[in-house]
Amino acid sequence: MNSTALQIELISDFNLQTLANYLENGEALPAVSARVAPFGQVVPALLHSDSLDKGAFALVWTSPASVVPAFSDAVQSRPVREQDILAEVREFAQHIITAKDRFRSVLVCAWSLPRWHRGLGLLDLQKPLGLRNLLLKMNLELISALQNVPGVYILNPQDWIEAAGKNAHSPKSWYLSKTPYGVEVLKQAAVEIKAALRTISGEARKLIVVDLDDTLWGGVVGDVGWENLRLGGHDHTGEAFVDFQRALQALRNRGILLAIASKNDEAVALQALRQHPEMMLRPGDFAAWRINWKDKAANIIEIATELRLGLQSVVFLDDNPFERARVREALPEVLVPDWPNDKTLGASTLLQMDCFDTAQLTGEDQSRAGMYAAEQKRERQKTEMPTVEHWLRSLQTKVTVEELNASNRARVAQLFNKTNQMNLTTRRMSESELVQWADRENRKLFAFRVADRFGDSGLTGILTLEFDGGTAAMADFILSCRVMGRQVEETMLAVAVEYSRRAGRERLQARYIPTAKNKPCHEFWMKSGFNHDDAGRVFSWDAAREFPRPASVELVVAENSAENSAVSSAEQHAAQDNPTAAEVRLAAQTVSR
Amino acid sequence: MTSTPQIPSYEDALPVVYKGLDELNQQRPRNQRLPATPECVLFGDSGNLNSLELSNFIVLIEQLVHEKFGVEVDLTEGDPFSPESGHMRTAGTLAAHISNLVREQA
């Protein structure tokens, strides 16, 4: 067994050993170690089985008749009341919610029926007691009961069944091995479950770098001119390119950034983007572009650097196999999918990619593209200012500190799990684990929102402290790359020092854990002014000494921080030992002078 | 118009068995993957497949035979696991059995 493999427990009323085999032996990451709970014992496995460690995931995949007995009556055409069925669904959902505490996350499969089961036939979807009618309501009830439970995610096996085709359900497999599905369904399930695990682990891609000629539009603009591009019009290929642009636009609206890497004359290409009447994406929709005759790999590095993203965040789309091969070879971290020769398949190829999935959808996601547009303005102004200090002052940066609360915890968990570069320890925890971790008397989590005159960057910083004797240990120091270098880092340290001092601690200590991606964090800490050991791993500050807060940053404490605090009740009990939210405000006000 | 099923020879049936082995190998650790050879032992004292894998393999091969030759076969009929004459002994015995089954039904 791979010691770094993610553990997952498969809980079902049917035999999922083949799924476990696909999960463990498939080439796709992450590596997984799967344990199959005894099949047919779903509720006992949910409630009582000896768990894997707390970091394990669970998959709950059941047939509806086994966990909702009233539905079994409906299958047998016995009289049954819809409300009784839905009550049993809610009871099952409650078991999942109870089990959730034992796992990092629980993946729950929605229910489906085999295609060969016609139920009431023509009337099955229409009549209240048709099996498909009931199943739709049951799935909605299940989703409704679970949709706001942190760490619970609902998967749709119907997609896997459709992908598997006519051999999706196999009565013979059922009779031979108590597996109702053919291997194609289980193989597809393994693909989707691994995608879900990657998503929950915060490995989503954030940037699409797209080529122009024959990728974003049909034709070579330098040869045919923008007026003669294949884009829209009464032309099936032109319509397909419009749909591909719409698909990119939809991803942009979800927070995925768009950029261009194209071998073209920049003026010619930008003219096409601005003037073509059926162009769905205009220059303002792209966070960056490199339209020139240079090597595309070099251009992608420049774009990622400009947007402060690691190459592991980048997807590169290009119709030219030579360019794809070049980027794959030069930049192995960049995801370069095969691109279809058939131009009508662009949109569907893009929309089936799972690398953009996220475990939460937050306001920050939806406004990310606008934030990067503001960043471009910021960077332009930087070049116009005589010194960096002038530029920092001109930004009028405002940092708002708040505690972990019900309204910010989804975003905090997301930031916690996806930030790589400015991350002291790169711990990963689910939303519920994070809330649980912070809900201890000797721990404190602060979240930081950053805004300036160019725009609101949203919740972009996290600081956690753990108190032990005279030491306040910094467990996490996390800052989004979007706001790095604007002295938010120093402001966070000032808050940490002041809070530690007011908590009666003698020193603040931080231990840097290196990863392949967090070198920028180390560079910041080495220049921070904290004392450090020879190896540059342990940093400390005498809490009696004030940490100099940047003059260019205004620090504000959120008014509702205490009221919304997820840990406020614990604090009331811990008032003797740790500062309350009101004291946080006082500490921050002291720092903000 | 009805199509006449193709009558497969042993050599025609062998790739179907190998395709099933290839699928099965995806469920196995890399160092336990089965070779695509007629001598590959499936079932018996030195057999490579456990009962779940055998079940999966049988269902897979039946589907592949249907797709390739247009004939529904039942590989659990007869005495598939007989140590002396069972068709599930090796990849080669299975291919020969498929060839015979399809010929009988054609």
Image (cartoon, coloured by chain):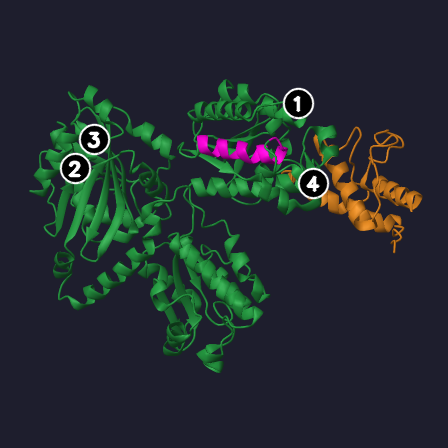
- The colour one sees for chain B in the rendered image is orange
For marks 2 and 4, give the CA distance. 60 Å
Task: Give the residue at mark 3.
Answer: A563
Looking at the figure, which quarter contains the C terminus of chain A?
A: top left
Task: Give the residue at mark 1.
Answer: A78
Kind of element beneath mark 1: loop
For marks 4 and 1, give the CA distance. 41 Å
Residues at circles 4 and 3 in contact by the CB criterion of under 8 Å: no
Instruction: Tell me which residue sits at (37%, 73%) in the image.
Output: A274
| Chain letter for the green colouring in the rendering | A
Three-letter residue code for mark 3: Glu
Numbered circle sitting on residue A15: none
Kind of element beneath mark 3: helix
- State which tag comes first along the sequence, 2 or 1: 1
In front here: A98 or A462?
A: A98
Task: Give the residue at mark 4.
Answer: B24
Task: Give the residue at mark 2.
Answer: A559
Kind of element beneath mark 2: loop
Residues at circles 1 and 3 in contact by the CB criterion of under 8 Å: no
In front here: A495 or A133?
A: A133
Instruction: Tell me which residue sits at (33%, 65%) in the image.
Output: A284
For marks 2 and 3, give the CA distance. 8 Å
Please state the horizontal and vertical placement of residue A554, each as a whole percent of the image.
12, 48
For marks 2 and 1, give the CA distance. 58 Å
